[in-house]
Amino acid sequence: MTTTVAAPATTTPVAEVRVARRWTQHGMLFVAPFLVIYVAFLVWPLLLGLRMSLSDVNIAGSNDDLIGFANYSEAFGDPRMWRSLWNTVVFTVLSTVPLVILGLVFALLVHNLRFVRWLWRLSFFAPFLLPSAVVSLLWLQMIYQPGFGLLNGTLGTDILWLGDPGVAMWSVVMTTVWWTVGFNFLLYLAALQSIPEHLYEAASIDGASAWDKLRSITLPMLRRTTGLVVVLQLLASLKVFDQIYLMTGGGPENATRPIIEYAYDIGFTGYRIGYASAVSYILFVLIVAVSLVQLRLFRKREETLS
């Protein structure tokens, strides 16, 4: 006589379904405030701006008729837009490289110090806490001043740091590096403190030098942090506005005007909100493209190294 064993039930009990549904409802209640803020202050303005970029609306809200891609066609044929976009790219390249390298160098120096480490951390990070208006006024009035500025007085020169089209962008980059390098420094310092100490001890036993430890242990362990720093720095530099607007106003001869300032001038000085929105969305697409390329490159590098 054979005994038939019943197969275990594969359906989820009703009680478990109710519990899962209750947890989902409770989770949605916790997420709801964030979703409301996210939709109200990000999704809705994003959609509204896209709609405005397809219209000829002005700052008074009139002439809100859709005109299709006419604003984008005008923008791609506008040499002033291309000049401001080029200024943005130049600023991004000139600022990203030293901000990443100096952030790493400063973090290595502070990490290897054995005395008053807190003072060095404060010294490198403190400028990042200052508002952009304070930083701009400090460098404009005390360091770049042509007559009695600290930089000309120290070098014995009379350079128009913010008045010469060939020097102004470099001056803004130098101010930006001094101001924001503390953030990258902090990220690198936190990553250095998370590297296991036994790796360095094992390398010392094998007779590795300080350079060998840096090349074989430190830099590979900081690979993810470097990817994060590069992406964040590129995004921040592409969105530059404050310090340039306060220090040079985009001058001299539009040599430092970034694309965000150009969109601001068109929208709030020229009253063409629709065209300014189109310019802004061109920058938005550029930022998204740069982000995707960077993430793809770092992901491919991670797969190659693993």
Image (spheres, helix red, strand yellow):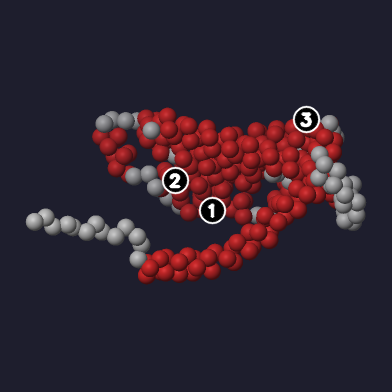
* Label 2 to label 1: alpha-carbon separation: 17 Å
Rendering quarter of residue 96: top right
* Label 2 to label 3: alpha-carbon separation: 38 Å
Between discs 2 and 1, the one toward the N terminus: 1
Where does the image place residue 51, in percent across and percent down from the top left? 78, 49
Instruction: Inspect the image, locate mark 2, and give the three-letter code of the amino acid beneath it.
Output: Ala
Mark 2 or 1, closer to the camera: 2
Between discs 2 and 3, the one toward the N terminus: 3
Check whether the beta carbons of the residues at disc 1 and disc 3 lie within 8 A of each other: no
Mark 2 or 3, closer to the camera: 2
> Which disc, if any, is residue 249?
none
Between discs 1 and 3, the one toward the N terminus: 1
Residue 223 visible in the picture: yes
Q: Is residue 196 left or right of residue 301?
A: left
Between residues 25 and 118, which one lies in front from this camera angle?
25
Q: How many marks?
A: 3
Around disc 2, counting alpha carbons within 10 Å, would you say few (fewer than 14), some (14 to 19), or many (20 or more)? some
Which residue, given by chain and number where applicable, does mark 2 sit on? 191
Between residues 80 and 90, which one lies in front from this camera angle?
80
Q: Quadrant of the C terminus?
A: top left
Q: Residue at x 63, y 59 (%)?
A: 38
Q: Is residue 83 above or below residue 196?
A: above
Where does the image place residue 226, in percent across and percent down from the top left? 50, 39
Q: Residue at x 34, y 30 (%)?
A: 209
Which residue in the rendered view is the most extreme toward the front?
1
Around disc 1, counting alpha carbons within 10 Å, would you say few (fewer than 14), some (14 to 19), or many (20 or more)? few
Mark 1 or 3, closer to the camera: 3
- SS of the residue at dot 2? helix
Where does the image place residue 105, in percent across and percent down from the top left? 50, 38
Which residue, given by chain and number where applicable, does mark 1 sit on? 122
Between residues 97 and 27, which one lies in front from this camera angle?
27
> Which disc, if any, is residue 166?
3
